[in-house]
Amino acid sequence: GVRVGVVVAPIIPLDGWERELEELFQALAELSPEVIYGEVLHVRGRNMEMLREVGVRVAVSKEVDAAVGQTFEKLLREYGLRGEYWYEYDPAENR
């Protein structure tokens, strides 16, 4: 009887992120949360600097954000889950 929501963040777009995100959605589908939200790693603040400090190199651009968002939304539909992807960049700019 517990209402459950999930925030998938940050999604760090390293090699294999699509497969890992799908595996996560498979598990979430079994949990059946009320809602799932997700967002890519934010480029603002110290996020990128902190990753570099531990040796992780990643690029987050409008195109990457759009790809992650589209994949997230596709997985929501495929697994019949409710939720929303919070775009870092305005998705209308990618059209």
Image (cartoon, grey):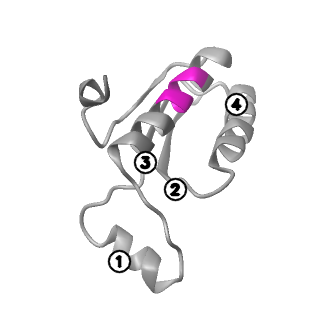
Q: Circle 3 sits on which residue?
A: 40
At x 59%, y 28%, the residue is: 33
Q: Which class describes the residues within 10 Å of circle 1: few (<14), some (14-19), or many (20+)?
A: some
Q: Which class describes the residues within 10 Å of circle 2: few (<14), some (14-19), or many (20+)?
A: some
| Residue 53 coordinates in the image, percent (x, y) | 44, 85
- Magenta includes 91? no
- Disc assigned to residue 1: none
Q: Which of marks 4 and 1 is nearer the N terminus?
A: 4
Q: Is residue 69 above or below residue 79?
A: below
Helix, strand or loop for disc 1: helix
- Disc assigned to residue 31: 4
Q: Earlier in the sequence, mark 1 or mark 3?
A: 3
| Residue 85 coordinates in the image, percent (x, y) | 42, 32
Of discs 2 and 4, which sits in the foreground? 2
In three-dimensional space, the C-alpha distance between marks 2 and 4, rounded to whole angstroms, equals 23 Å
- Disc assigned to residue 49: 1
Q: Quadrant of the N terminus?
A: top right
Q: Give the range drawn in magenta.
A: 70-74
At x 33%, y 37%, the residue is: 87
Helix, strand or loop for disc 3: strand
In three-dimensional space, the C-alpha distance between marks 1 and 3, rounded to whole angstroms, equals 16 Å
Dot 2 amino acid type = Ile
Q: Which class describes the residues within 10 Å of circle 3: few (<14), some (14-19), or many (20+)?
A: many
User: Mark 1 near mark 3, Cβ–Cβ under 8 Å?
Assistant: no
- Disc assigned to residue 12: 2
- Magenta includes 72? yes
